[in-house]
Image (cartoon, rainbow, N blue to C red):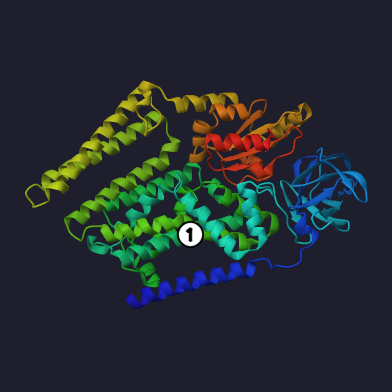
Amino acid sequence: MTGRMRFDRGGLVAALWLALGLLVAATPAQGMVDQQEIFPFTVEQVGEDRLVARWDVAEDHYLYRHAFDFELRDGDNEIIEVSYPSGEAFSDEFFGDVVIYRGTLQVHLQTAEPVGEGAQLYAEFQGCNEPESLCYPPSSLEAEIASGAVQYSDGSGGAGAAGGGGQGPMGELEALLGGGNLWAILGGFFAAGLLLAFTACIYPMIPILSGLIVGSQPGGGRPGTGRALWLSFVYVQGMAITYALAGALAGLSGRAIQADLQGPVVTVAFSALFVALALAMFGLYNLQMPASVQGRLQAASSRLPGGQVAGVAAMGVLSTLIVGACSGPALVAALAFIGNTGEVVLGAGALYIMALGMGAPLLAVGTAAGRWMPRSGPWMESVKQVFGFIFLGVAWWMSSRLMPDGLVLAGWAVLLLAAAVWLAWRLLRSRGTGGSVPARGAGATLAAVLAVAGAAQVLGAVTGAGDPLRPWVGITGDPYAQARAQVLEEWRHVETLDELEELLDEAREAGRPVVIDFSAEWCVYCVQLEERTLPDDRVQAALEGAEKVRIDVTDMTDADRELMEAYGVYLPPAILFYNGEGEEQSEYRVAGFKDAEAFAERTREAFGG
C-alpha cells in the first residue's frame, strides 16, 4: 500500500514536470518579430453586413490611416463603407501631414450584402517604430471571417474581442502570455489565482474539501497530516486540470462549458449528490465503489464520501465546473489568448498555474483538517456528523438559486435549528463522560448561536427578506435589493443579437456611448455588481449619458449563447464599453467584481472622461 502511494505521488510529480516542460516548449522564442507581432490584426463579424477590423498597435509604434486598404473576398459581395476613428494629426517627414493611430484601432466595415460563410477579408496597412525612426514596408493579411472571431489562414494570431490589447488587467495578462517570458507567465497567473482564491466563488470549496478529508478514513479514524495533504493535492489537481482542459475547449470553441452546467438539471443533480454524501456522513449507509472497480484502481481503502482518490479528484472536477463557475481577468485573458492565437498548450498551461494558485489555500485548509481533527472515537463520529450538516448546507445553497426567497430562508431555518437540536442532544448524552468544561461550554454556545440563527431565518422568511445573511431586512428594509431592483428597471433589457446590433447602430448614429452588462442570477459576482457597484452615485455619474444595456444569460438559451459568442464573452459577469463612435473599448472590459470606485474610474477611462 505504501509503495503504491509512493508510486502515485511520484507519477503526479512527474506529470507536473511534464506540464512545466510543455509550457516551456510552448513559450514563443525571443528574437526578431514580424509586423504581425508588432501590429496584431483581427477581424470579426458583428452583424450580418458589418465587420470590425482591429489592430492592437505595440507601444511606441503607430499606423498610417492613408495606408489602409480592404478587399472582401465573398463572391460578388463588396465593402461599401469604411468608418475610421478620428486618430491623431501627425507631421511626417516623408508623407507630410497625416493621421496616425496608436494603441487599439477599430475600423468598421459595411458590406453590400450579408457576409457569407467562408468569406475572407484582405487588408493592407503600414506602420512605423517612432523611437527608431523606422518605417516598415506595407504589409497585408488575409483572414477567414467567423462570427465574433477570426481564423487566420496562415496560422498567425492577434488579440480578440475578449482580451484586448490595451493596458487593462485582461490586456496586460494577455500581453503577458504573448510576450513569451515563462517565469513572468508562471508568476503572474499564479498570483492571479491566489487573489481569486479569496473570493466568494471559491469559499464553497472549503467545506467541500474539509468534509471529504474528514470522511476519508475507514473506521472513523483521523486521516492524519500526510493523507490529508495528499487528498488535498488530488482535489486541487482535479481543479487545475479541469481549468486547463475546459479553458482550452472554451478558448477554441468560444464558449465556456461552466456556463452550460448552471441549468436546473445539473444543479439538482449536484445538490442530490451532496445530500447523499451528507446521509453517509450521518451513518445511514456507506457509499462504496464496486469491488471490481476498487480492484482495478487499487486505491486507498476508502469509503465515500471522500476517501477514494478517484472520488476526491472527481469532486475537484465537479466543484470547478459547477460551484466555481466564476469569471475574472486572468481567466478571460487566457481564453481570449487561446481563441485568437491557437496557442492551446501555453494558454491551458497558464490556466493550470492559475488554478494551482487558487488551490494553495485549499491545500492549507485540507492539511489542517487532517492535522487538527480529533483521534478516532466518539468525537470523530461527531465531527463527521457536523460535516454531514455542512454538506446539507452546500446542497441547499446550490439548489437555492432555483427557489423563491421565502422557501430558501425556511430551508436554512430548518437546517440551522436541526443542527442546534442535534448539538444540544450530543451535549446531554455526553454529560458525565469526563469531557472538559471549556469544550462543553463552547458546544453549548455554538448550539445557542445556531438556534438564534435559525430563529432569524424564520423571521426573515415570515417578513419577506430575500438574503439569508441579512434576514432582518424584511423589517428594516433591504437597501441592496432596492438598489438592484432600480438598476434592473433603469437598464434596457436585450434578448437577441439582432436587437443588440440595432441598439448599437442607433447609439452610434446618435453619438451616444453604450455600456453592456452580461449577467446571470447564478453568478455571485453579477449579483454583487448589481447590488453594490452599479447603483453607487459615483458609477451613476460616470455612466451619465450612456445607453445602459443588460443581457440576462441565466437560462443559457440559444439566443444567450449566440450573444455571448458574438461578443467574445465566456462567463458572466462581463461589462463592455462602446464609445460614441460605436467602437468597443475592449481594453477596459470588466470581468469579475469591481468596487464602485474602481468601476467608476474604469468607466471614465473607457468613455474618455
Quarter of the image that includes the C terminus:
top right
* Helix, strand or loop at mark 1: helix
228 left or right, relative to 425: right
Query: Where residue 482 sits: x, y (%)?
Result: 48, 24
> As drawn, which residue projects farthest toward the left?
432
Q: Residue at x 64, y 54 (%)?
A: 174
453 left or right, relative to 31: left
User: Residue 24 falls in which quadrant of the image?
Assistant: bottom right
475 shown above or below 27:
above
Quarter of the image that includes the N terminus:
bottom left
419 left or right, relative to 257: left
Query: Where residue 451 sits: x, y (%)?
Result: 23, 35
Count all numbered tags in the image, as a single digit.
Answer: 1
Q: Nearer the viewer, residue 207 or 398?
A: 207
Query: Where residue 573 sits: x, y (%)?
Result: 56, 40
Q: Residue at x 15, y 43 (%)?
A: 441
Query: Where residue 121 sits: x, y (%)?
Result: 83, 50
221 left or right, relative to 522: left
Any part of residue 102 in sight: yes
138 shown above or below 605:
below
285 shown above or below 527:
below
Q: Nearer the viewer, residue 189 or 92?
A: 92
Q: Residue at x 20, y 42 (%)?
A: 422
Any part of residue 493 in sight: no
User: Residue 491 falls in which quadrant of the image?
Assistant: top right
In the image, what residue type sits under mark 1?
Leu
Which residue matches tag 1? 356
